[in-house]
Amino acid sequence: MRVLVVLCHPLRQSFTGAVLDQFTRGLGEAGHIAEVADLYRERFDPVLSEADYAQFEGRPMPEDVLREQERVDGSDALVLIFPVWWYGMPAMLKGWLDRVFCAGWAYERRHDPEGSLLRPRPCTFLVSTGSSAKVMARHHYDRELHHLWSEGVLGYVGVDPIDIHFLLDATWNPDMRMSHLELAYSLGREFPPTSSSSQHNDPG
């Protein structure tokens, strides 16, 4: 499979970057081809501009958006690797979704559109968090984020199945970080997911 792996972190030499390295190592050993879209290193502009409103007027989208859409069109699967900031995606990644998955390409611009203009493909989320399983469970953050991302974002444009992994305590617990990196490698080796899920990596 040709897998588009979207990395969103300002520091390449970060834990999130290490998750990318382990996942793509597993992908390669499984015989898949990974194309990495490193949004920060590639200086993707996440700001929706006046030019992006071409999508609502039937005109061509900006060149940088068209390039990203070509990447998605050329992929058999998507992987998103990023940290949770303020219990959401980083602005860079949210802007990538805002601009790239536009009307007329990802979905029809009409009242209550049904279905996606994109063909189905699997997607895996590898999401590092500073929160513990206790905090996530207390406030149901994992449940809410899973619903938002699987139903309101990627699921809306035909991505299926969606496999979401919250890499908990990544900031504070070295043992957890090692466990997460092992998980990232194994998910690459066993890619693609066969069903939608939301999982923690919690040894306790």
Image (cartoon, rainbow, N blue to C red):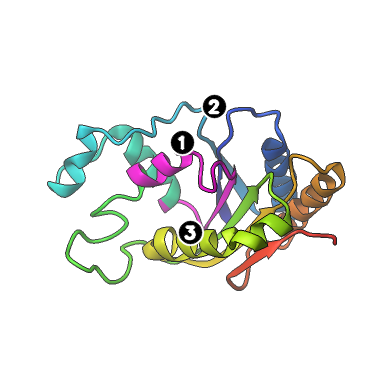
Return the residue nearer the eye: 153 or 79: 153
Q: Of discs 2 and 1, which sits in the foreground?
A: 1
Which segment did they paint magenta? Answer: 73-99
Under circle 3, the secondary element is: helix
Q: Position of residue 54 (x, y in %)?
A: 18, 41
Q: Is the N terminus in the top left, top right, bottom left or bottom right quadrant?
A: bottom right
Residue pointed to by mark 3: 149
Please report the residue visible at 17 percent of the width from the left and 63 percent of the height from the top: 110
Quarter residue 16 falls in: top right
Rendered view: 112 above or below 47: below
Q: Relative to 13, is 91 above or below?
A: below
One can see residue 31 in this view:
no
Which numbered dot is residue 41?
2
In 3D space, how far apart are the residues under numbered discs 2 and 1 (Cα atoms)?
12 Å
Name the spot of residue 88 as percent of width and height, x first: 51, 47
Disc 1 residue type? Met
